[in-house]
Image: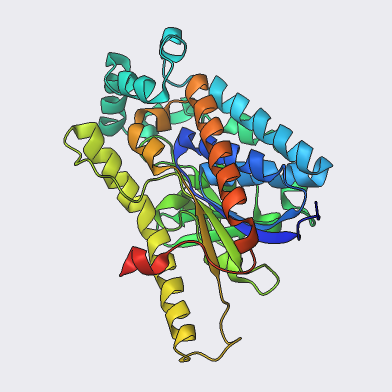
Amino acid sequence: MAKPMKKRINLALQGGGAHGAYTWGVLDRLLEEPDLEIAGISGTSAGALNGAALKAGMRQGGREQARDNLDWLWGQIGAVKDLHVPAWMGMAIPEARMISGALEWSLPYMMADSFSRMVSPYVWGPFYRNPLESIVSQFHYDDVCGPGGPDLFICATNVRDGKVRVFSGDSINADVVMASACLPTLFQAVTLRDPRSGKMEPFWDGGYTGNPALFPLFAKSLPDDLVIININPIIREKLPTTPPEIQNRINEISFNSSLLRELRAINFVQRLMTDGSVTEGAMKSVLVHMISDDALMNDLSVATKTIAIPSVLSALKAAGRTAAGTFLETHWDDLNVRQTADLKDMFD
């Protein structure tokens, strides 16, 4: 059998809390393809953690080390116990959907969720500690920030002006990764040096303004193909009626809005190129692809976003691997040739 042509892609990694384990599975499968080069990564929240782990691994020992880094990362996330969830909940019920539903309506979760909405994370004073700190502080930032491997961009939201900031190269550190994943109802804002103003500014989760930001991947040195790994479902057929369902859908719409704005802009530019209104070469021709499992994400709730249950993480990883395998099998020949995401249908 002839060796397949090498392909180059960029990855856009959404945030979505512990549901980012789905992206773990996608990346794990993509890294098995020796003829697939990941040239650039833009990540927010869980996407930032996944991107940093992958980038460091590629520099440390190539694809297998990147896979090992991702396995380590999600093993650590599965061990975080911010909320006390009965151990049986992750073992006795086999389906992630059932675990998610049982957790969402469990008394400990409802009490903790209500508490987080009524009490500011600043009430803890000197006793406060970001639960991700013990994990992201162990990343090897010489490798996360170093040359070689994919170009890495991490998004966070400036609290003061409400605009996205993109961190890359030497500006990335543990605080930047924590800021990208900083949900303001759960975590205190992370103070960083703003790459635009140079001043120390507070930052929140990047998902509010770029989930993730696509524009850093438009650089001429990077390939045209942009593979978006979706965590937050764009479509939910069922009307949210319970308080958790309503709040979850509000968050999904909010976190998808910045991505949809950029995709709409890409679609607009593509239309201008098609009808000749823009001279060829004047703007980058971006080829958009998506890997997602909206059916699975529709079955899960916000509870399994905020609480990492090992069996759910494993199910999400398996689903991500399956989706990535199907994508590669179906669209390998399309990569670097044509777009597979139907943006026209999405926006018309």
Residue 172, percent across and down? Answer: 65, 51
Quadrant for the C terminus, please: bottom left
Q: What sort of colour scheme is used for the picture?
A: rainbow
**Residue 47 appears left or right of 182:** right
| Residue occupying the point 73% across, 52% down | 145
Residue 320 makes an appearance in the image: yes
Q: Position of residue 229 (x, y in %)?
A: 52, 49
Q: Can residue 196 be spotted in the picture?
A: no
Q: Is residue 314 above or below residue 278?
A: above
Q: Write down the quadrant of residue 152 in the picture.
A: bottom right
Quarter of the rendering containing residue 334: bottom right
In the depicted structure, whether residue 47 falls above or below residue 219: above
Q: Nearer the viewer, residue 245 or 208?
A: 245
The residue sitting at 43% across, 66% down in the picture is: 263
Q: Is residue 295 found left or right of 223 in the rendered image?
A: left
The extreme front residue here reads 1
Indicate whether 18 appears above or below 182.
Answer: above
Q: Residue at x 38, y 33 (%)?
A: 121
Q: Is 261 placed left or right of 341 in the picture?
A: left
Q: Classify 268 as above or below 59.
A: below
**Picture quarter containing residue 24?**
top right
Question: Left or right: 32 with respect to 299?
Answer: right
Residue 131 placement (x, y as % from top left): 52, 29
The outermost residue toward the right is 61
- Using the image as rendered, state which of residue 88 and residue 196 is in the foreground: 88
For the residue pair 20 and 332, the one nearer the viewer reads as: 332
Identity of the residue drawn at 35% across and 63% down? 346
